[in-house]
Image (tube, rainbow, N blue to C red):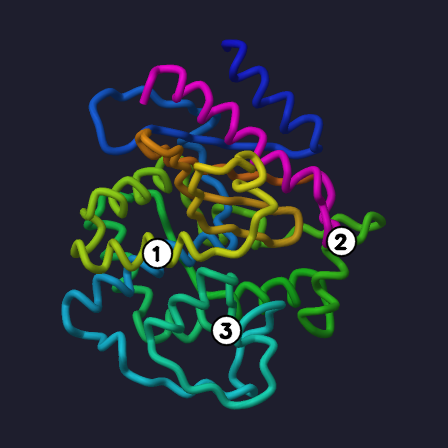
Amino acid sequence: MNERDHEILRIFADAGVRGWLHAVALGGPGTREVGLGPDEPVVMASVYKLPLLIAFCREVDAGTIDPRERVTIVPTERTVGPTGLSILRDDVTMSWRDVALSMVAVSDNAAADVLLERVGLDQLYQAMADLGLTRTRVRSGTAEVHRTLVADTASADTAAAFEALASHDVAPEVRAYSPVYGSATTAREMTMLLDAIWSDRAASAEQCRFAREVLGAQIWPHRLRSGFPYAGVRVAGKTGTLGAIRNEVGVVQFDGERPVAVAVFTHAARADAMLPRADAAIGLAARVAVTDLRSGRL
């Protein structure tokens, strides 16, 4: 193990997390990469919304979904969540493409479940298979994950289930923490998906451009972006959070250089609602990996 890998491991250890990482430069010759357990199965959490976004884009290309078609989402049918449609009080009517935008930009659970129902798991599986992502499996939307959490923690509702997860007196074993039972992927397959998006292979050029714009609109600066707080650097990505799970996959691009796809997945020793050191570790580990790749003059 080289000094770079030791540094990434130290960052994870200092933050109290287990971590998996893969980074690779996009759009040019050369196959240099940085990996730490890049092919081990990991829990996706809300990173599943990235494959769902691409499945949606492919359905738009196929003409089976009109992105401008209006859909009305009512409060009683919305999945619980801290952002987006999940917290609105009244009926909302919007286009399918704006549903997709909300799903990614603010990690909107309600938008994601509505979109997943429209696209379908079968079409999502087919999209990933077509792109060669054989180890990426989305088993359900967020509402079903919440139902398993309630059952596994013997809680009355979703809020109580997350309180149980955060308890330091009891360490509940939940299916959502297992890549065997929950939605799973590998760090390498997520950089492969990002490569397909940035090279216009994941869908049509128009829809890949839409996907890049949506990923660039993500509002969260506390993980991947925190490692690159500089002018002249663009970061586009998708976070994932579920109790002790904190992830982000995305693309980092310095002006005048090739973009770098990075996927970082972590599982913390604690499940507090706020774990700033675990969040920061994602940005720090990504910076080490990207710096190493940039040293080869991307």
- Left or right: residue 67 compared with residue 173: left
Whichever of labels 1 and 2 marks the residue nearer the N terminus, that label is 2
Examine the structure image and report whether residue 113 is included in the region drawn in magenta. Answer: no
> Relative to 240, is 42 above or below?
above
Q: Amino acid type of disc 1?
A: Glu
> Where does the magenta region start and end?
269-298
- Classify mark 2: residues with Cα within 10 Å, few (<14), some (14-19) or many (20+): some
Residue 242's x, y, as percent? 60, 54
Residue lying at 51% horizontally and 68% vertically, measured from the top left: 109
State the residue in front, 58 or 204: 204
State the residue in front, 231 or 252: 231
> Would you identify the image quadrant in which residue 164 lies?
bottom right
Q: Amino acid type of disc 3?
A: Ala
Residue at the outermost front position? 231
Q: Dot 3 corresponds to which residue?
A: 110
Q: Dot 2 corresponds to which residue?
A: 166
Q: Which mark is residue 77?
A: none
Q: Dot 1 corresponds to which residue?
A: 213
Whichever of labels 3 and 2 marks the residue nearer the N terminus, that label is 3
State the residue in front, 16 or 201: 201
Task: Give the Cα separation between the discs numbered 3 and 2.
Answer: 23 Å
Examine the residues drawn in magenta and state their main secondary structure.
helix
Residue lying at 61% horizontally and 46% vertically, measured from the top left: 222
